[in-house]
Amino acid sequence: MATDIANILGVEQSGGLGSVPKKKEELGQEEFMRLLVAQLNNQDPTKPMDNAEFLTQIAQFSTVDGIQGMETSLSDLGASMMSTRAIQASSLVGRDVISASNQAAYVPGNEISGVVAMPVSASAVQIQVSDSRGQLVKVLDIGSVGAGIHKFAWDGLLDDGSSIPQGSYQVTASGLIDGSAEALPAFASARVASVSIGAAGAEISLNLDGGDSVSYADVLQYL
C-alpha cells in the first residue's frame, strides 16, 4: 500500500527506514488525474463524491493549467516583440530622427533642423537657436502658421556669412496666440550614432550625435 501511495503522489523512496521522501516541485496533469482516480477508487461507497465537487476539481485544475500555458505564451510573445524592437532600433543607426528633445548637434556644412508643434494657429512664430552656454545665436522668423507640425531648418550661417562652431545647440520656439506671446514646443532632429539595449532588453536607448541620449519610445518621427 505504501508503494502504491508513493507512486500516486510521485514520491521517490530510498528504501531506508527514516528516509525523507522527495516531492515533485509541481503537480502536473498526469499526477492530478492519478490522484483523482485514486480518490474515486478509495472513496466511501456510502458517501460517494458529489458530481458538482468532482466537476469543480477538474475545472479548477483546467483553469490553473490554462493560466500557466497563457503566461508562457505571453512571455514568449513579449520576448519576440522585444527582439523585433531591438532590430528596428538598430536599423536607425546613421539615420536622422526627431525625438522629445530640443538638443541639436551641429557640424559645419550640415543643418540644424527640427519641427515646431503648433497646438493652434499663431502669428510671429520664431525659432531661437542658442549655444551650450544658453547664448542666443540665431532667430528664425517663421511668420504665421496654422495648427499642426511644421518643419524648420537653418544652415548654421550667420548674417556675415560665417558659420557657427561645431557643437551642441538648443532650439526653442515662440509665437503670438490671440495676441499673447506663448512658448511653443520645438524638437530638433539628430542623427543616431548607436543603440544601447538594457538588461534583458528592458530599455532601448538611442545615442545621438552630440552626446544626447533618448529612449526609443520617445522618437516622434523618423527622417
Image (cartoon, rainbow, N blue to C red):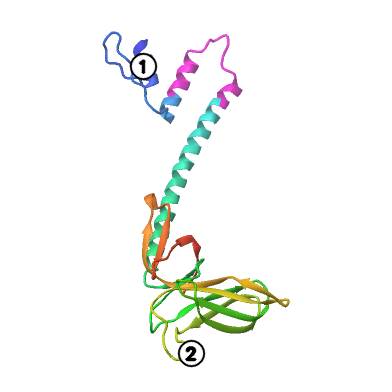
**Number of numbered discs on residues:** 2
Place residue 4 in its image quadrant: top left
Q: Name the residue type under label 1.
A: Ala
Secondary element under disc 1, as helix, strand or loop, is helix
* Residue position marked by numbered label 2 in the rendering: 159
Indicate whether residue 48 is drawn in magenta. Answer: yes
Instruction: Name the residue type under label 2.
Output: Asp
Q: Where is residue 59 in the image (x, y as percent from the top left)?
A: 55, 30
Q: Which of 145 and 89 is in front in this view?
A: 145
83 or 45: nearer the eye?
83
Q: Earlier in the sequence, mark 1 or mark 2?
A: 1
Q: Residue at x 39, y 15 (%)?
A: 5
Mark 2: secondary structure = loop
Residue 133 at x, y percent in the picture: 46, 71
Magenta stretch holds residue 54: yes
Of residue 188 and residue 195, the one placed in the foreground of this image is: 188
Task: Say which quarter of the image contains residue 83.
Answer: bottom left
Query: Which circle, 1 or 2, is nearer the viewer?
Result: 2
Image quadrant where one finds the N terminus:
top left
| Crowding near the residue tagged with mark 1, few <14, some 14–19, many ≥20 C-alpha atoms within 10 Å | some
Mainly helix, strand or loop, the magenta region? helix
Q: Where is residue 185 in the image (x, y as percent from the top left)?
A: 58, 70
User: What percent of the width, then of the height, locates residue 60?
Assistant: 54, 29
Direction bottom: furthest residue = 160
Residue occupied by mark 1 = 6
Magenta-colored span? 34-56
Residue at left offset 38%, top offset 56%: 197
Asked if disc 1 and disc 2 are in contact, CB closer than 8 Å, the reply is no
Residue at the image point whose x is 47% and y is 42% from the top: 71
Q: In the displayed structure, would residue 94 be above or below residue 80?
A: below
